[in-house]
Image (cartoon, grey):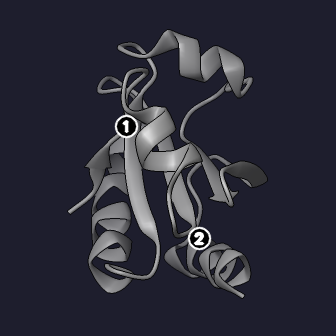
Amino acid sequence: MELKITDSNFEAEVKNSGMPVMVDFYADWCGPCKMMAPVVAQLAESYNGKCKIGKCNTDENPKLASEFKVMSIPTFIFFKDGKAVKTVIGAVSKNELEENIKQVLA
């Protein structure tokens, strides 16, 4: 199950996380975001306990979207040791997201 990432829990769930985190910046009205939702859910299940997988609604959390300069959605940002280390923009394959997760786990 994906974590719900918000302005209020970002520090605890992402910055102070003891493991890498992938955050999916999305919006409910976004077609490509809806298309990626099942992929994100599968990754959350596959990497449970190894990498946190979170979703951040950009409409509800504009501060985070602005802080990380999210200009188009979906945007996937990978965090390691609380810092953004990689960004992937747009609807991409499960394999591409998985490769990035493996890189931040290495």
Camera-side residue of 52 and 32? 52
Residue at 56% of width from left, 22% of height from top?
Answer: 64
Say if mark 2 contacts mark 1, CB within 8 Å: no
Residue at 51% of width from left, 47% of height from top?
Answer: 14
Query: Residue 61: where, in percent of width, then height?
Result: 43, 16
- Label 1, secondary structure: give it: loop
Query: Residue 48: where, in percent of width, then height?
Result: 31, 79
Q: Which mark is residue 53?
A: none
Q: Which mark is residue 5?
A: 1
Q: With respect to residue 26, does 52 lie above or below?
A: below
Disc 2 marks which residue? 97
Query: Residue 74: where, in percent of width, then height?
Result: 54, 40
Dot 2 amino acid type? Leu
Q: Is 79 placed left or right of 41 in the picture?
A: right
Q: With respect to residue 33, does 28 lie above or below?
A: above
Rendering quarter of residue 37: bottom left
- Label 2, secondary structure: give it: helix
Residue at 33% of width from left, 85% of height from top?
Answer: 46
Dot 1 amino acid type? Ile
* Quarter occupied by the C terminus: bottom right
Q: With respect to residue 69, does 50 lie above or below?
A: below
Mark positioned earlier in the residue sequence (2 or 1):
1
Q: Is 103 placed left or right of 50 in the picture?
A: right
Query: Residue 13: where, in percent of width, then height?
Result: 42, 47
Q: Is 29 placed left or right of 92 in the picture?
A: left
Rendering quarter of residue 93: bottom right
- Eye-nearest disc, 2 or 1: 1
Q: Is 99 placed left or right of 47 in the picture?
A: right
